[in-house]
Every structure is written in structure tokens, then in C-alpha cells.
Image (cartoon, grey):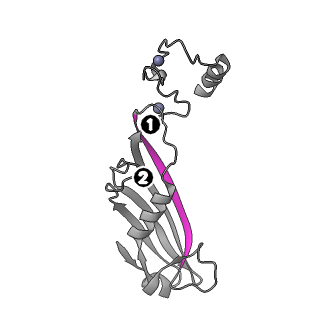
Amino acid sequence: MIIDLKRVFVNEDSSLPIEYLLDMSTVDFSGVYPLKEPVRITGTVSGKASLVELNAEIIYKYEAPCDRCGTYTAKSHTVKINKPLAPSIEGEDSDSIIIVPDMKLDLDELVYSEVIMSLPMKHLCREDCKGLCPKCGKNLNEGACGCPEKEIDPRLSALAELLDD
Ligand SMILES: [Zn+2]
Ligand SMILES: [Zn+2]
């Protein structure tokens, strides 16, 4: 979706609400399609004393197998955007400004890149996921498997219990 922001740039003290869903279900991230549900964007573009700003929140649900044990897990992530908008760059500092040529904001492109950059590098069913036994493949979150080698260090399991709370 392209948003025409001329009204906000021309009139001071005006704002434009944004409420929008973007389909990103075709995004392939290391072999899975984690964004099955549409990505939700809410926020406003507001102008005040010749400064036009975008304040928005992107919420997406990331669904993929746990990195350690493979259990299918869904987690919600939020990206906050709080950036000034300008039709062209005036200084060199273009990273903190969103450029909107012809006062038009390409929301799809913006949301797309913000979400891609924020995709989790680590996706676990729970922080202390014990993973699978490398020998028998049992999911160790469901209990020990009884394989003789590679006993869990008692100090580590005590720590895991602490972290469980
Ligand atoms: Zn797991
Ligand atoms: Zn085992």
C-alpha cells in the first residue's frame, strides 16, 4: 500500500492513522514459512511544526519448529518504528530518516524490510529447552531418556530448575 502524505506535509498539526494487514506468508526463512498469519501494522503519521513523523507498531507471529527440539512453536514479536519522514535527504544522516519521494510512503516495502531485519535468530519453544538426545532422539523436555553416556551435569539441571520459574 502506498500512502499519500501530502496532506500531512502541507497542513501543520494533522495526522493520518494507519491500520493495515500485510501478507508475508511467502517469506522463506531458512527453509520454513514462519509468517503464516498476516503482519499487523498500526500507528500514525503526524505533522507538527514542519516535522513529519511515523509512529507505528508492527506485530507478527513467528511460527516455526524449535531450533533445539523441533516442536512447532508460535511466538509474537513487536517492532516499533519511530522515525521522521522527509521527501528528500538534507544531511548525510539518512539512516534515521525515512525518505518518502513525492511525499508518498511505500508501507509494504517499509514493513517488509523492518520485519525481515527483526526475524529472530534464535527460536526456542522455551528459554531452557533441553533439546533432543543426540543418541536416541528423545525430546528431553519430556524427561530423561536413559541413555548411559552424556549425563546431564547436576549443576546444570539445578540451574535449569531455577530458570523454570
Ligand atoms: Zn524446544
Ligand atoms: Zn537418549
Residue 84 appears in the figure: yes
Q: Quadrant of the N terminus?
A: bottom left
Q: Is residue 157 above or below residue 8?
A: above
Residue 165 appears in the figure: no
Q: Mark 1 or mark 2: which comes first in sequence?
A: 2
The residue at the point 59 percent across, 18 percent down is 152
Residue extending furthest toward the right: 155
The residue at the point 46 percent across, 58 percent down is 115
Q: Ligand 1 within 8 A of label 1's CB?
A: yes
Q: Position of residue 100 (x, y in %)?
A: 47, 80
Q: Quadrant of the C terminus?
A: top right
Q: Quadrant of residue 65?
A: top left
The residue at the point 65 percent across, 24 percent down is 159
- For the residue labelled by badge 1, is the local secondary structure a helix, a strand or a loop? loop
Q: Are the two marked residues, 1 and 2, in contact with CB atoms closer than 8 angstroms?
A: no
Q: Is residue 134 above or below residue 75?
A: above
Identify the amino acid type marked 2.
Tyr
Mark 1 = which residue?
66
Magenta part, dominant SS = strand
Left or right of 72 on screen, residue 134:
right
Q: Position of residue 102 (x, y in %)?
A: 43, 87
Mark 2 = which residue?
60
- For the residue labelled by badge 2, is the local secondary structure a helix, a strand or a loop? strand
Disc 2 packing (10 Å; few <14; some 14–19; many ≥20): many
Q: Which residues are magenta?
A: 72-85
The residue at the point 58 percent across, 26 percent down is 164
Q: Position of residue 110 (x, y in %)?
A: 45, 68
Identify the amino acid type marked 1.
Cys
Left or right of 129 on screen, residue 22:
left
The residues tagged by marks 1 and 2 sit, at their Cα atoms, a distance apart of 17 Å
Q: Is residue 84 above or below residue 143?
A: below
Disc 1 vs disc 2: which is toward the camera? 1
